[in-house]
Amino acid sequence: MRRQSWQRYLIDQGGLADWVDRGQPRPDHRAWHRYLRWVAEQLAVEPVSAEVVGIDLADGRWRLSARRTSTGEPLALDCDGLVLTGPGAPLRLPGQPDHHPRILDGRSFWTAGAALSSGGPVEVCVVGSGETAGSITGALVGLLPEGSVVELVSDHGVLYTRGESFTENRMYSDPDAAGWRQLAERHRREFLKRTDRGVFSLQVEQVLNQAGAVRTVAGRVSHLQPVGAKVIVEVDYEQERERIAFDWVVVAVGFDPMWFWHLLGERARAALAGAAGGGSTARPPSRTALERAVGHDLAVTGLHPKLHLPVLAGVAQGPGFPNLSCLGLLADRVLGAYVRSARGAGAPTAGTAAGRPG
């Protein structure tokens, strides 16, 4: 693994000394993307650029129906294991229209930089209190024209930060050694709430602490209404309602972890519902049931062939799997289900990873 390590990549690119001299900072997403591309090239990995339009079971294997991105040509893939990654479709607010140019979400925001930064000062509303909302607000601070204002609307109106103690970090990097599965489920869910949902990282908090143009507003956004070049945001708080006009609104309230359900065929739905102990081919199992059914290899226990769901593995297996903050451990858990020991016979079986862009 050292041949594909972050340090080896920096040596190859001539950047190791610079990284060390700067105090070994965390790489941003762009730098991490370049590193992963370099690893893929070293291993001769050839990603298939295609959109998955259907997933079902056939002859004891997963069968994916897809369309190639470049040509639209149909493509069929059969595999013994399937990993579904990505945050899923962004959650929506009442009244939120489809594809409105002034209403963005946790995905579309990152391609709207040119539109947001052009022109004069603007007023932007960011809805949410988690890491997505925090990252977007931090990006807006360096993006918007001078004189702009960002109002961050959250249920509690206070920005909470994630803890960075050894014990908390250990739960992310090595949940087994830290005793994650020995905790009662209610305590695991409380940990997730305090460290991963509805909180900002310390790095984002440091940026926002210095940003005089960012204000926090307590309340729950009950409705969005585009009116001309403005978007009216209805905010409810303590039985009072306020209507505020903004130039831009970014809805960053989370994503749907069950995004893959509509892609599943009848056989796949029935098998997943049976393994999770509930649901039907018409309705998915409850999120709680699926979270409890995720095993050590991040696959749904009792479902064959294996279906790995890292996005739902947090409660049962550890807090770092859903947001991929322990990517090496995640890969080890998944691949360990297929790679045989040196004394075993035969070659590893085939697996496919399908995901939505994060």
Image (tube, grey):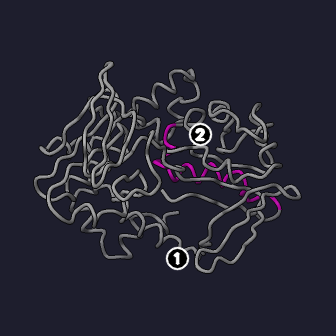
Q: Residue furthest right?
A: 59
Residue 140 among those drawn in magenta: no
Tell me the residue at 43%/46% (across/down). 96
Earlier in the chain: of badge 2 and badge 1, it is: 1
Which corner quadrant of the image does residue 197 belong to? top left
User: On the rendered structure, is 138 left or right of 211?
Assistant: right
Residue tagged 2: 313
Q: Please state the horizontal and vertical placement of residue 283, each as a whole percent of the image.
A: 72, 38
Q: Is residue 164 visible?
A: no
User: On the rendered structure, is 191 left or right of 59?
Assistant: left
Q: Amino acid at mark 2?
A: Ala
The chief SS type of the magenta part is loop
Q: Amino acid at mark 1?
A: Glu
Query: What segment is highlighted magenta in the picture?
Result: 319-345
Q: Please state the horizontal and vertical placement of residue 338, each as a whole percent of the image.
A: 73, 55
Q: Please state the horizontal and vertical placement of residue 124, each as a whole percent of the image.
A: 25, 48
User: On the rendered structure, is 143 left or right of 58?
Assistant: left
Tell me the residue at 73%/51% (across/down). 264
- Secondary structure under tag 1 reads helix
**Residue 41's mark?**
1
- Against 18, residue 229 (above or below) is above
